[in-house]
Image (tube, rainbow, N blue to C red):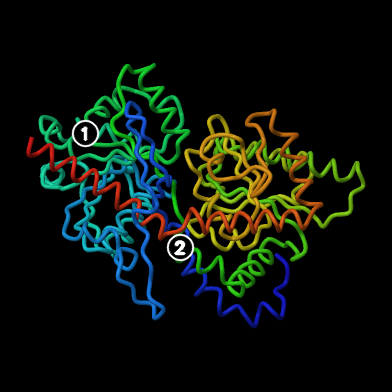
Amino acid sequence: MAKPSAAWAQKRWLFPLLVALSLSLSTALAFLLRAAFDSSCDRHTFVVPDNRFDSGRTAGGAGNGLADRNPLGFMKSKRVLLVSHELSLSGGPLLLMELAFLLRGVGAEVCWITNQKPSGTDEVVDNLEHKMLGRGVQVLSAKGQEAVGTALKADLVVLNTAVAGKWLDAVLKENVHQVLPKVLWWIHEMRGHYFKMDYVKHLPLVTGAMIDSHVTAEYWKNRTQERLKIKMPDTYVVHLGNSKELMDVAEDSVAKRVLREHVRESLGVRNDDIIFGLINSVSRGKGQDLFLRAFYESLQLIQEKKLVVPSLHAVIVGSDMTAQTKFESELRDFVALKKIQNRVHFVNKTLTVAPYLAAIDVLVQNSQARGECFGRITIEAMAFQLPVLGTSAGGTTEIVVNGSTGLLHPVGKEGISPLAKNIVKLATHVERRLTMGKRGYERVKVMFLERHMAHRIAAVLKDVLQKAKNHRHW
């Protein structure tokens, strides 16, 4: 690690405060519905028009319309049960936790169940449960009469991920059909092995499904019909949105500068160097191996063409050597083999992504196969005015405008050379990099803010609650 600079020493007292703030903001995520209405009746996919929520404010800041009230206020005193297949630092559980906090914020009674827990003590699970308890979320055992009774009394039950469907029969048993009419099933998966009847046999009978992108919703519609011969329920396409807290930091030049200096100093990277960062759990599906191959190829291109550019670095945030995975060992072996240890940096997985977004210059979203269902880190990076180099697959194509807010490349080995060339393009054209970052930020301001999310998720929950109510009276 480089010796701390005098300037940093004067600012060091700010860092703990900023990190504490970023801990909550990096996970403050929710949902954003597309601003259009799909009239195709046989698709059963619903989105909400924007003008439904338009309302002005007075010059003094006080308003008299819907925009001035919390749109989730109708959930006050409602009983909500959230069922997650696991409790970890992965996207699905963290998103469900954020929904729990949003609902608690308006006075809903929220209970949480984790269907699968480690057999022994787990620090991550303990910390996340402690955080929920501190926000007034009741944490229940996945099994037993208390879980059954809570499900029967709840106004709304949210199942998180396809795997959570195993909880229905295993715990509710003969009571399952009383609960299905008030279930909203939130699905994030894009992998084929999740299409098992053991997981989703009750899917056609729930009130609705909530899916993170149009690409994923279409995939689930086709896959369930072709492979399982079942029909999707009414489906709500949901995009994520950045929290106000994250936007506050992203728009605070002083906070970003302090975080940037600290992280770069800890990595031994100079301020003028260019960092390409991939922030995701380390796994083959996230494409860290192909990114590192592209990064190495970009260094070769720069050398062959004798281009004059600042030193390039690659940062992999999401490492976990305690798990001793074969894949991560392969990544580190490749770095050593190519002798680029001074340019590639591995950072442990963390909830606190804001410091790394402030420190890097370009985000690489390299998820493989069908890509990300959505990819929340993408809109977080765009909020920090970072261009995105992403795979042309999944939800990334619904976020990144190719050639405007970033550059897309194919998945698989075919994408290595295009990604390498895109790395060189952004490394050698500062203005293009900055312009793309600004356009990405503008897109976030139009589509991916908390105020957009708040109204639209409220519309989804209202619809689901009304359908559940109609079923009880039927």
Residue 94: in sight, yes or no?
A: no
First-in-chain label (1 vs 2): 2
Q: Quadrant of the N terminus?
A: bottom right
Seen in the image, is 276 located left or right of residue 352? Answer: right
Which residue in the structure is indicated by mark 2? 25
Q: Residues within 10 Å of mark 1 (few under 14, many from 20)?
A: many
Q: x, y (%) of residue 37?
A: 38, 40
Seen in the image, is 417 located left or right of residue 240? Answer: right
Measuring 61% from the left and 35% from the top, which residue is drawn there? 392
**Relative height, residue 198 to residue 56 (above, below):** above
- Label 2 SS: helix
**Relative height, residue 65 to residue 179 (above, below):** below
Which residue in the structure is indicated by mark 1? 168
Residue 27: in sight, yes or no?
A: yes
- Label 1 SS: helix
In-front residue for pair 116/453:
453
Q: Residues within 10 Å of mark 2 (few under 14, many from 20)?
A: many
In-front residue for pair 358/437:
437
Measuring 37% from the left and 37% from the top, which residue is drawn there? 187
Q: x, y (%) of residue 124?
A: 39, 53
* Dot 1 amino acid type: Leu
* Dot 2 amino acid type: Leu
Quarter location, residue 235 = top left
Q: x, y (%) of residue 17?
A: 50, 75
Measuring 56% from the left and 54% from the top, which residue is drawn there? 443
**Relative height, residue 112 to residue 132 (above, below):** above
Q: CA distance from mark 1 to mark 2?
A: 32 Å
Seen in the image, is 144 located left or right of residue 453? Answer: left
The label nearer to you, 1 versus 2, is 2
Seen in the image, is 113 located left or right of residue 403? Answer: left
Q: x, y (%) of residue 186?
A: 33, 40
Q: Residue furthest bottom?
A: 10
